[in-house]
Amino acid sequence: MNSQFKINKHPFPSLLYLEWILLAITALTAVIPPPLRRFHPKPPELSICGTFPDLPVCNLLPELSIYSLVIFALMGLILPTKSKTSKIIYTATEISLILTTGLFGERFARLFPFLYIILVTRSCLIFNLPGRLFVTSLSFTLFLFTTQLKYQLFNLQASPQAQEKFRFLSLNWSLVFGLSLVFVLLMMNAVLSERHSREKLAIANEKLREYAMRIENQATLEERNRIAREIHDSLGHSLTALNLQLETALKLWQSNPGKAETFLATAKELGSKALKDVRQSVSTMRYNPLQEQSLDSAIASLSENFHRSNGILPICQINLEYSLPPEINTAIYRIIQESLTNITKYGYATEVKLELTTTRGNLRLIIQDNGRGFDLGQNTTGFGLHSMRDRTLALGGEFNINSTPGSGCKITVNIPLMRLR
Protein backbone atom coordinates (compact mmCIF):
# COMPACT_ATOMS: atom_id res chain seq x y z
CA MET A 1 0.00 0.00 0.00
CA ASN A 2 2.83 2.40 0.88
CA SER A 3 4.75 1.65 -2.33
CA GLN A 4 1.66 2.21 -4.42
CA PHE A 5 1.13 5.54 -2.70
CA LYS A 6 4.67 6.63 -3.53
CA ILE A 7 4.35 5.53 -7.14
CA ASN A 8 1.23 7.63 -7.48
CA LYS A 9 3.18 10.60 -6.09
CA HIS A 10 5.89 10.21 -8.75
CA PRO A 11 5.59 13.07 -11.27
CA PHE A 12 5.88 10.62 -14.18
CA PRO A 13 4.81 7.09 -13.09
CA SER A 14 5.28 5.75 -16.63
CA LEU A 15 8.92 6.91 -16.51
CA LEU A 16 9.44 5.01 -13.27
CA TYR A 17 8.03 1.82 -14.80
CA LEU A 18 10.28 2.32 -17.83
CA GLU A 19 13.30 2.57 -15.54
CA TRP A 20 12.43 -0.71 -13.88
CA ILE A 21 11.86 -2.46 -17.20
CA LEU A 22 15.19 -1.19 -18.50
CA LEU A 23 17.02 -2.31 -15.36
CA ALA A 24 15.33 -5.71 -15.40
CA ILE A 25 16.18 -6.40 -19.05
CA THR A 26 19.76 -5.26 -18.62
CA ALA A 27 20.20 -7.25 -15.40
CA LEU A 28 18.90 -10.41 -17.05
CA THR A 29 21.26 -9.82 -19.96
CA ALA A 30 24.15 -9.49 -17.51
CA VAL A 31 23.21 -12.50 -15.35
CA ILE A 32 22.24 -15.02 -18.04
CA PRO A 33 25.27 -15.94 -20.19
CA PRO A 34 24.82 -16.12 -23.96
CA PRO A 35 24.01 -19.66 -25.19
CA LEU A 36 27.06 -19.74 -27.52
CA ARG A 37 29.55 -18.49 -24.95
CA ARG A 38 30.89 -22.04 -24.44
CA PHE A 39 32.16 -22.07 -28.04
CA HIS A 40 34.21 -18.89 -27.55
CA PRO A 41 37.14 -18.16 -25.31
CA LYS A 42 36.29 -16.51 -22.03
CA PRO A 43 36.60 -12.72 -22.35
CA PRO A 44 38.75 -10.73 -19.94
CA GLU A 45 37.10 -9.64 -16.70
CA LEU A 46 36.62 -5.86 -16.68
CA SER A 47 35.69 -5.31 -13.01
CA ILE A 48 37.93 -4.85 -9.99
CA CYS A 49 36.76 -8.06 -8.38
CA GLY A 50 37.06 -9.87 -11.71
CA THR A 51 40.68 -8.81 -12.07
CA PHE A 52 41.67 -8.86 -8.40
CA PRO A 53 39.48 -11.51 -6.75
CA ASP A 54 41.60 -11.54 -3.58
CA LEU A 55 40.52 -8.04 -2.50
CA PRO A 56 38.83 -8.06 0.97
CA VAL A 57 35.71 -6.31 -0.28
CA CYS A 58 35.24 -8.99 -2.95
CA ASN A 59 35.40 -11.75 -0.36
CA LEU A 60 33.16 -10.03 2.20
CA LEU A 61 30.44 -8.73 -0.12
CA PRO A 62 30.05 -11.00 -3.14
CA GLU A 63 26.46 -9.87 -3.69
CA LEU A 64 27.17 -6.16 -3.18
CA SER A 65 26.42 -5.28 -6.80
CA ILE A 66 23.03 -6.99 -6.75
CA TYR A 67 22.03 -5.20 -3.55
CA SER A 68 23.24 -1.87 -4.97
CA LEU A 69 21.22 -2.40 -8.14
CA VAL A 70 18.04 -3.23 -6.19
CA ILE A 71 18.46 -0.20 -3.93
CA PHE A 72 19.10 2.02 -6.94
CA ALA A 73 15.90 0.79 -8.58
CA LEU A 74 13.82 1.30 -5.42
CA MET A 75 15.14 4.84 -4.95
CA GLY A 76 13.07 5.84 -7.96
CA LEU A 77 10.00 5.58 -5.73
CA ILE A 78 11.06 8.60 -3.67
CA LEU A 79 12.25 11.80 -5.32
CA PRO A 80 13.26 14.68 -3.01
CA THR A 81 11.86 17.98 -4.23
CA LYS A 82 12.12 20.43 -1.30
CA SER A 83 15.39 20.37 0.65
CA LYS A 84 18.56 21.10 -1.32
CA THR A 85 20.60 19.03 1.11
CA SER A 86 18.35 16.00 0.65
CA LYS A 87 18.68 16.34 -3.13
CA ILE A 88 22.48 16.36 -2.92
CA ILE A 89 22.55 13.38 -0.56
CA TYR A 90 20.10 11.51 -2.77
CA THR A 91 22.20 12.09 -5.91
CA ALA A 92 25.45 11.22 -4.12
CA THR A 93 23.91 7.96 -2.92
CA GLU A 94 22.83 7.12 -6.48
CA ILE A 95 26.35 7.75 -7.77
CA SER A 96 27.82 5.55 -5.03
CA LEU A 97 25.45 2.73 -5.91
CA ILE A 98 26.31 3.06 -9.62
CA LEU A 99 30.05 2.88 -8.92
CA THR A 100 29.56 -0.06 -6.58
CA THR A 101 27.48 -1.94 -9.13
CA GLY A 102 30.00 -1.44 -11.91
CA LEU A 103 33.31 -1.69 -10.10
CA PHE A 104 32.65 -4.67 -7.85
CA GLY A 105 30.32 -6.72 -10.05
CA GLU A 106 31.85 -8.10 -13.19
CA ARG A 107 28.50 -9.28 -14.57
CA PHE A 108 26.92 -5.88 -14.08
CA ALA A 109 29.72 -3.85 -15.65
CA ARG A 110 27.65 -3.38 -18.82
CA LEU A 111 24.92 -1.69 -16.74
CA PHE A 112 27.02 1.47 -16.45
CA PRO A 113 25.54 3.46 -19.38
CA PHE A 114 21.92 2.73 -18.48
CA LEU A 115 22.39 3.58 -14.81
CA TYR A 116 23.94 6.93 -15.70
CA ILE A 117 21.07 7.68 -18.10
CA ILE A 118 18.59 6.94 -15.32
CA LEU A 119 20.64 9.16 -12.98
CA VAL A 120 20.40 12.07 -15.43
CA THR A 121 16.67 11.47 -15.89
CA ARG A 122 16.03 11.59 -12.15
CA SER A 123 18.20 14.69 -11.73
CA CYS A 124 15.96 16.49 -14.22
CA LEU A 125 13.01 15.78 -11.95
CA ILE A 126 14.61 17.11 -8.75
CA PHE A 127 17.04 19.86 -9.86
CA ASN A 128 16.76 23.09 -11.80
CA LEU A 129 18.70 23.59 -15.02
CA PRO A 130 22.13 24.31 -13.39
CA GLY A 131 21.83 21.18 -11.26
CA ARG A 132 20.80 19.09 -14.27
CA LEU A 133 23.80 20.29 -16.26
CA PHE A 134 26.15 19.52 -13.35
CA VAL A 135 24.81 15.98 -12.86
CA THR A 136 24.99 15.33 -16.63
CA SER A 137 28.59 16.54 -16.79
CA LEU A 138 29.49 14.52 -13.69
CA SER A 139 27.90 11.41 -15.16
CA PHE A 140 29.89 11.73 -18.35
CA THR A 141 33.11 12.36 -16.37
CA LEU A 142 32.55 9.28 -14.19
CA PHE A 143 31.76 7.25 -17.27
CA LEU A 144 35.05 8.31 -18.84
CA PHE A 145 36.85 7.50 -15.59
CA THR A 146 35.33 4.02 -15.35
CA THR A 147 35.98 3.41 -19.05
CA GLN A 148 39.62 4.35 -18.56
CA LEU A 149 39.81 2.07 -15.53
CA LYS A 150 38.38 -0.80 -17.56
CA TYR A 151 40.93 -0.05 -20.26
CA GLN A 152 43.72 -0.34 -17.73
CA LEU A 153 42.30 -3.63 -16.43
CA PHE A 154 41.99 -4.90 -19.99
CA ASN A 155 45.62 -4.04 -20.68
CA LEU A 156 46.70 -6.38 -17.91
CA GLN A 157 45.11 -9.35 -19.67
CA ALA A 158 44.94 -8.68 -23.43
CA SER A 159 47.38 -8.59 -26.31
CA PRO A 160 48.53 -5.30 -27.91
CA GLN A 161 46.24 -5.79 -30.91
CA ALA A 162 43.26 -6.38 -28.61
CA GLN A 163 44.23 -3.35 -26.54
CA GLU A 164 44.22 -1.10 -29.58
CA LYS A 165 40.84 -2.45 -30.69
CA PHE A 166 39.37 -1.97 -27.20
CA ARG A 167 40.70 1.58 -27.06
CA PHE A 168 39.05 2.42 -30.39
CA LEU A 169 35.73 0.93 -29.28
CA SER A 170 35.93 2.78 -25.96
CA LEU A 171 36.36 6.12 -27.69
CA ASN A 172 33.42 5.47 -30.00
CA TRP A 173 31.25 4.25 -27.12
CA SER A 174 32.16 7.33 -25.05
CA LEU A 175 31.11 9.63 -27.90
CA VAL A 176 27.80 7.78 -28.37
CA PHE A 177 27.20 7.81 -24.63
CA GLY A 178 27.87 11.57 -24.39
CA LEU A 179 25.42 12.28 -27.20
CA SER A 180 22.86 10.02 -25.48
CA LEU A 181 23.19 12.01 -22.25
CA VAL A 182 22.70 15.27 -24.13
CA PHE A 183 19.63 13.85 -25.89
CA VAL A 184 18.12 12.64 -22.59
CA LEU A 185 18.80 16.02 -20.97
CA LEU A 186 17.19 17.96 -23.82
CA MET A 187 14.22 15.60 -23.98
CA MET A 188 13.56 15.84 -20.23
CA ASN A 189 13.89 19.63 -20.30
CA ALA A 190 11.36 19.79 -23.12
CA VAL A 191 8.95 17.47 -21.31
CA LEU A 192 9.24 19.38 -18.03
CA SER A 193 8.87 22.74 -19.77
CA GLU A 194 5.75 21.55 -21.56
CA ARG A 195 4.32 20.23 -18.31
CA HIS A 196 5.16 23.46 -16.49
CA SER A 197 3.46 25.45 -19.25
CA ARG A 198 0.37 23.28 -18.96
CA GLU A 199 0.26 23.77 -15.21
CA LYS A 200 0.60 27.53 -15.57
CA LEU A 201 -2.10 27.51 -18.24
CA ALA A 202 -4.39 25.43 -16.02
CA ILE A 203 -3.83 27.85 -13.13
CA ALA A 204 -4.46 30.83 -15.39
CA ASN A 205 -7.65 29.23 -16.74
CA GLU A 206 -8.84 28.49 -13.22
CA LYS A 207 -8.18 32.08 -12.13
CA LEU A 208 -9.90 33.36 -15.26
CA ARG A 209 -12.89 31.13 -14.59
CA GLU A 210 -13.09 32.35 -10.98
CA TYR A 211 -12.73 35.95 -12.14
CA ALA A 212 -15.44 35.52 -14.76
CA MET A 213 -17.71 33.94 -12.15
CA ARG A 214 -17.11 36.84 -9.76
CA ILE A 215 -17.82 39.33 -12.52
CA GLU A 216 -21.00 37.47 -13.45
CA ASN A 217 -22.13 37.34 -9.83
CA GLN A 218 -21.31 41.02 -9.37
CA ALA A 219 -23.20 41.95 -12.53
CA THR A 220 -26.17 39.87 -11.42
CA LEU A 221 -26.12 41.49 -7.99
CA GLU A 222 -25.92 44.97 -9.48
CA GLU A 223 -28.82 44.25 -11.83
CA ARG A 224 -30.90 42.90 -8.95
CA ASN A 225 -30.11 45.98 -6.90
CA ARG A 226 -31.08 48.17 -9.82
CA ILE A 227 -34.43 46.45 -10.22
CA ALA A 228 -35.00 46.46 -6.46
CA ARG A 229 -34.40 50.19 -6.28
CA GLU A 230 -36.48 50.75 -9.38
CA ILE A 231 -39.37 48.90 -7.72
CA HIS A 232 -38.84 50.97 -4.57
CA ASP A 233 -38.75 54.24 -6.46
CA SER A 234 -41.72 53.58 -8.75
CA LEU A 235 -43.87 50.88 -7.20
CA GLY A 236 -43.22 52.09 -3.65
CA HIS A 237 -44.29 55.59 -4.57
CA SER A 238 -47.43 54.35 -6.33
CA LEU A 239 -48.43 52.09 -3.43
CA THR A 240 -47.86 54.87 -0.91
CA ALA A 241 -50.08 57.23 -2.89
CA LEU A 242 -52.64 54.45 -3.33
CA ASN A 243 -52.74 53.89 0.42
CA LEU A 244 -53.32 57.60 1.07
CA GLN A 245 -56.16 57.70 -1.48
CA LEU A 246 -57.84 54.69 0.13
CA GLU A 247 -57.51 56.11 3.63
CA THR A 248 -59.06 59.41 2.51
CA ALA A 249 -61.87 57.60 0.72
CA LEU A 250 -62.67 55.59 3.87
CA LYS A 251 -62.82 58.76 5.92
CA LEU A 252 -65.15 60.48 3.46
CA TRP A 253 -67.32 57.45 2.67
CA GLN A 254 -70.00 58.27 5.25
CA SER A 255 -69.99 62.06 5.03
CA ASN A 256 -69.30 62.68 1.33
CA PRO A 257 -69.69 59.54 -0.82
CA GLY A 258 -69.27 61.45 -4.10
CA LYS A 259 -65.90 62.83 -3.17
CA ALA A 260 -64.86 59.46 -1.73
CA GLU A 261 -65.66 57.86 -5.06
CA THR A 262 -63.27 60.32 -6.74
CA PHE A 263 -60.49 59.21 -4.40
CA LEU A 264 -61.31 55.57 -5.15
CA ALA A 265 -61.04 56.21 -8.90
CA THR A 266 -57.65 57.81 -8.35
CA ALA A 267 -56.64 54.82 -6.24
CA LYS A 268 -57.67 52.50 -9.09
CA GLU A 269 -55.44 54.41 -11.50
CA LEU A 270 -52.54 54.20 -9.08
CA GLY A 271 -53.13 50.45 -8.71
CA SER A 272 -53.03 50.02 -12.50
CA LYS A 273 -49.81 52.01 -12.65
CA ALA A 274 -48.27 49.92 -9.88
CA LEU A 275 -49.22 46.72 -11.72
CA LYS A 276 -47.63 48.11 -14.89
CA ASP A 277 -44.43 48.90 -12.98
CA VAL A 278 -44.29 45.35 -11.62
CA ARG A 279 -44.72 43.83 -15.07
CA GLN A 280 -42.06 46.13 -16.48
CA SER A 281 -39.60 45.15 -13.73
CA VAL A 282 -40.25 41.44 -14.31
CA SER A 283 -39.85 41.93 -18.06
CA THR A 284 -36.54 43.69 -17.47
CA MET A 285 -35.23 40.70 -15.47
CA ARG A 286 -36.27 38.13 -18.06
CA TYR A 287 -35.66 39.87 -21.36
CA ASN A 288 -32.43 40.77 -23.11
CA PRO A 289 -33.40 43.51 -25.59
CA LEU A 290 -30.17 43.18 -27.61
CA GLN A 291 -30.20 39.42 -27.98
CA GLU A 292 -31.56 39.39 -31.52
CA GLN A 293 -31.27 42.96 -32.78
CA SER A 294 -28.72 45.66 -33.38
CA LEU A 295 -28.14 48.67 -31.17
CA ASP A 296 -29.76 50.96 -33.76
CA SER A 297 -32.93 48.85 -33.79
CA ALA A 298 -33.04 48.69 -29.99
CA ILE A 299 -32.72 52.48 -29.70
CA ALA A 300 -35.46 52.90 -32.30
CA SER A 301 -37.76 50.68 -30.20
CA LEU A 302 -37.04 52.78 -27.11
CA SER A 303 -37.86 55.94 -29.05
CA GLU A 304 -41.17 54.50 -30.27
CA ASN A 305 -42.15 53.42 -26.76
CA PHE A 306 -41.23 56.87 -25.44
CA HIS A 307 -43.33 58.47 -28.18
CA ARG A 308 -46.36 56.33 -27.36
CA SER A 309 -46.08 57.11 -23.65
CA ASN A 310 -45.33 60.84 -23.82
CA GLY A 311 -46.35 61.98 -27.28
CA ILE A 312 -42.77 63.14 -27.91
CA LEU A 313 -40.56 61.60 -30.59
CA PRO A 314 -36.89 61.89 -29.64
CA ILE A 315 -34.57 63.41 -32.25
CA CYS A 316 -31.96 60.70 -32.83
CA GLN A 317 -28.62 61.13 -34.58
CA ILE A 318 -26.75 57.84 -34.69
CA ASN A 319 -23.45 57.46 -36.53
CA LEU A 320 -21.61 54.22 -35.75
CA GLU A 321 -18.63 53.59 -38.02
CA TYR A 322 -18.19 49.96 -36.90
CA SER A 323 -19.92 47.40 -34.74
CA LEU A 324 -19.39 47.61 -30.99
CA PRO A 325 -18.65 44.85 -28.47
CA PRO A 326 -21.71 43.32 -26.80
CA GLU A 327 -20.86 44.74 -23.37
CA ILE A 328 -20.79 48.28 -24.78
CA ASN A 329 -24.04 47.78 -26.69
CA THR A 330 -25.77 46.60 -23.52
CA ALA A 331 -24.39 49.47 -21.43
CA ILE A 332 -25.39 52.10 -23.98
CA TYR A 333 -28.87 50.64 -24.30
CA ARG A 334 -29.39 50.62 -20.52
CA ILE A 335 -28.12 54.19 -20.16
CA ILE A 336 -30.51 55.42 -22.86
CA GLN A 337 -33.37 53.42 -21.37
CA GLU A 338 -32.72 54.82 -17.89
CA SER A 339 -32.47 58.37 -19.23
CA LEU A 340 -35.76 58.17 -21.11
CA THR A 341 -37.43 56.65 -18.06
CA ASN A 342 -36.23 59.51 -15.87
CA ILE A 343 -37.44 62.05 -18.43
CA THR A 344 -40.85 60.37 -18.45
CA LYS A 345 -41.12 60.36 -14.65
CA TYR A 346 -39.57 63.66 -13.64
CA GLY A 347 -38.54 65.71 -16.68
CA TYR A 348 -41.85 66.90 -18.12
CA ALA A 349 -39.93 67.71 -21.30
CA THR A 350 -41.31 68.67 -24.69
CA GLU A 351 -38.15 67.95 -26.69
CA VAL A 352 -35.56 65.21 -26.37
CA LYS A 353 -32.33 64.91 -28.41
CA LEU A 354 -30.19 61.80 -28.60
CA GLU A 355 -26.76 61.69 -30.30
CA LEU A 356 -24.57 58.57 -30.56
CA THR A 357 -21.30 58.73 -32.54
CA THR A 358 -17.94 56.96 -32.79
CA THR A 359 -14.82 59.00 -33.63
CA ARG A 360 -11.17 57.85 -33.51
CA GLY A 361 -11.48 55.12 -30.94
CA ASN A 362 -14.04 56.93 -28.81
CA LEU A 363 -17.78 56.50 -28.34
CA ARG A 364 -19.85 59.52 -27.35
CA LEU A 365 -23.45 59.52 -26.21
CA ILE A 366 -25.37 62.74 -25.54
CA ILE A 367 -28.94 62.79 -24.21
CA GLN A 368 -30.51 66.21 -23.73
CA ASP A 369 -34.01 67.39 -22.82
CA ASN A 370 -35.69 70.75 -22.16
CA GLY A 371 -37.55 69.60 -19.06
CA ARG A 372 -37.70 71.15 -15.63
CA GLY A 373 -34.25 69.90 -14.62
CA PHE A 374 -33.07 69.51 -11.04
CA ASP A 375 -30.44 70.60 -8.58
CA LEU A 376 -27.41 68.28 -8.77
CA GLY A 377 -26.48 69.09 -5.19
CA GLN A 378 -29.82 67.88 -3.88
CA ASN A 379 -30.44 64.88 -6.17
CA THR A 380 -27.49 62.54 -5.63
CA THR A 381 -29.19 59.45 -4.19
CA GLY A 382 -31.29 58.33 -7.16
CA PHE A 383 -30.38 54.87 -8.29
CA GLY A 384 -30.85 55.69 -11.97
CA LEU A 385 -27.97 58.19 -12.05
CA HIS A 386 -25.71 55.86 -10.05
CA SER A 387 -26.53 52.98 -12.38
CA MET A 388 -25.65 54.98 -15.50
CA ARG A 389 -22.42 56.22 -13.94
CA ASP A 390 -21.41 52.71 -12.79
CA ARG A 391 -22.02 51.22 -16.23
CA THR A 392 -19.86 53.92 -17.81
CA LEU A 393 -17.01 53.62 -15.31
CA ALA A 394 -17.02 49.83 -15.67
CA LEU A 395 -16.00 50.33 -19.32
CA GLY A 396 -13.29 52.86 -18.45
CA GLY A 397 -15.40 55.80 -19.63
CA GLU A 398 -16.46 59.20 -18.33
CA PHE A 399 -19.96 60.17 -17.22
CA ASN A 400 -21.04 63.79 -16.94
CA ILE A 401 -24.42 65.33 -16.18
CA ASN A 402 -25.39 68.99 -16.36
CA SER A 403 -28.72 70.23 -15.06
CA THR A 404 -30.21 73.16 -13.26
CA PRO A 405 -33.82 73.72 -12.19
CA GLY A 406 -35.86 74.97 -15.14
CA SER A 407 -33.08 74.42 -17.72
CA GLY A 408 -33.44 70.77 -18.61
CA CYS A 409 -30.79 68.10 -18.33
CA LYS A 410 -27.83 66.99 -20.46
CA ILE A 411 -26.06 63.64 -20.02
CA THR A 412 -22.71 63.02 -21.75
CA VAL A 413 -21.02 59.62 -21.89
CA ASN A 414 -17.54 59.04 -23.36
CA ILE A 415 -16.20 55.48 -23.65
CA PRO A 416 -12.75 54.63 -25.09
CA LEU A 417 -12.83 51.89 -27.69
CA MET A 418 -9.16 51.26 -28.51
CA ARG A 419 -8.46 48.90 -25.59
CA LEU A 420 -11.73 47.04 -26.13
CA ARG A 421 -11.34 46.30 -29.84
Image (spheres, rainbow, N blue to C red):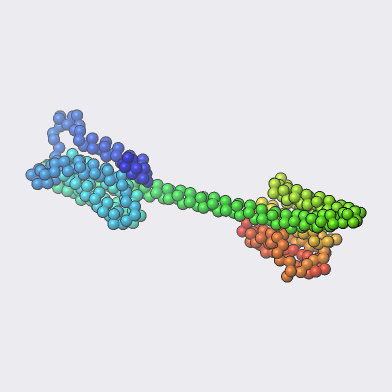
Image position, residue 271 (x, y; %): 80, 51
Image position, residue 416 (x, y; %): 66, 61
Q: Is residue 45 above or below residue 87?
A: above
Residue visible at 27% across and 39% down in the picture = 23
Is residue 160 or residue 329 the one in the foreground? 329
Image position, residue 272 (x, y; %): 81, 50
Is residue 208 or residue 198 the one in the foreground? 208
Is residue 210 or residue 91 the one in the foreground? 210
Image position, residue 213 (x, y; %): 57, 51
Q: Is residue 404 above or below residue 281?
A: below
Of all residues, the one furthest to the front in this rendering is 254
| Left or right of residue 259, residue 87 in this image | left
Q: Is residue 379 above or below residue 45?
A: below
Residue 415 visible, this angle:
no
Residue visible at 54% across and 52% down in the picture = 210
Residue 38 visible, this angle:
yes
Please state, as top left, top right, bottom left or bottom right, where the C terminus lies in the image.
bottom right
Residue visible at 74% across and 63% down in the picture = 411
| Left or right of residue 298, residue 185 in this image | left
Residue visible at 70% across and 57% down in the picture = 229
Query: Can you tell which quarter of the image residue 39 is in?
Result: top left
Please state, as top left, top right, bottom left or bottom right, where the N terminus lies in the image.
top left
Total numbered circles: 0
| Left or right of residue 326, residue 52 in this image | left
